[in-house]
Image (tube, rainbow, N blue to C red):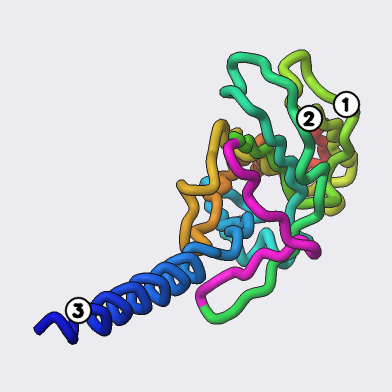
Amino acid sequence: MKQYLPIIALTAVAAFSCNRETVEGKGDKAPSRIGFATQLTRGNTITDPASLAEKGGFNVWAFSHAAKWSENPAKTPLLDGTHVTGTVSGSDIIWDYGTQIDWPENEYVSFFAYGPAESATVSGTTIDGIPAIDFTVATSPQQQTDLLIATPVYDQTGPMYSNSKPVGIFFNHALSRIGFSGLLLNNDDQRVR
């Protein structure tokens, strides 16, 4: 029995050392990329994510910060007015913004967006550090565009989005379309101003 102890001990050492190497290899996981999924409130011109994709997508800002946004920490831009385009694939929309960004480790990330991408311009930031946009309504109704502003998504972390789960961006219509019609009773030529 004593003759077999050194072989058993060597086998155990070999098994543990191989096992440790395997565990270390499995621990090296690729960082998760930031992706997006969209929802919209009911609207007239842009009614769903597919119509937002057809109108040119949206612009997004993402800032990383060590403490929660409300604590006013220093913020590092990860996405700075980045144009996100959508491709319709069956009933899904695949949103793409070119060079993909990984979730930073041990940092919060907050997101802001508006769409369609060409509908407004950025004029700076608010006192809270949120991007401020300028939008002008066209005088001709045929040239008027919709404006969607996303509800801010504050204080997200990479572990919340494992397995490539996308960040949900919920757009609200910032404008209302008002239409009216009239009936002339006496066949008179009248102008409505």
Where does label 2 land, which residue? 131
- Sequence-wise first label, 1 or 2: 1
- Sequence-wise first label, 3 or 2: 3
Is residue 184 something one can see in this rendering?
no
| C-alpha span from label 1 to label 2 | 6 Å
Where in the figure is residue 40, as x and y percent of width and height? Answer: 55, 50
- Given contact means CB atoms under 8 Å apart, are the residues at marks 1 and 2 in contact? yes
Residue type at tag 3: Leu
Q: Which mark is residue 124?
A: 1
Which residue is depicted at the point 23% across and 81% down? 8
**On-image quarter of the C terminus:** top right
| C-alpha span from label 1 to label 3 | 74 Å
Where does label 3 land, which residue? 5
Q: Quadrant of residue 95?
A: bottom right
Circle 1 SS class: strand
**On-image quarter of the N terminus:** bottom left
Q: Which residues are magenta?
A: 91-106
Q: Residue furthest left?
A: 1
Q: Quadrant of residue 61?
A: top right
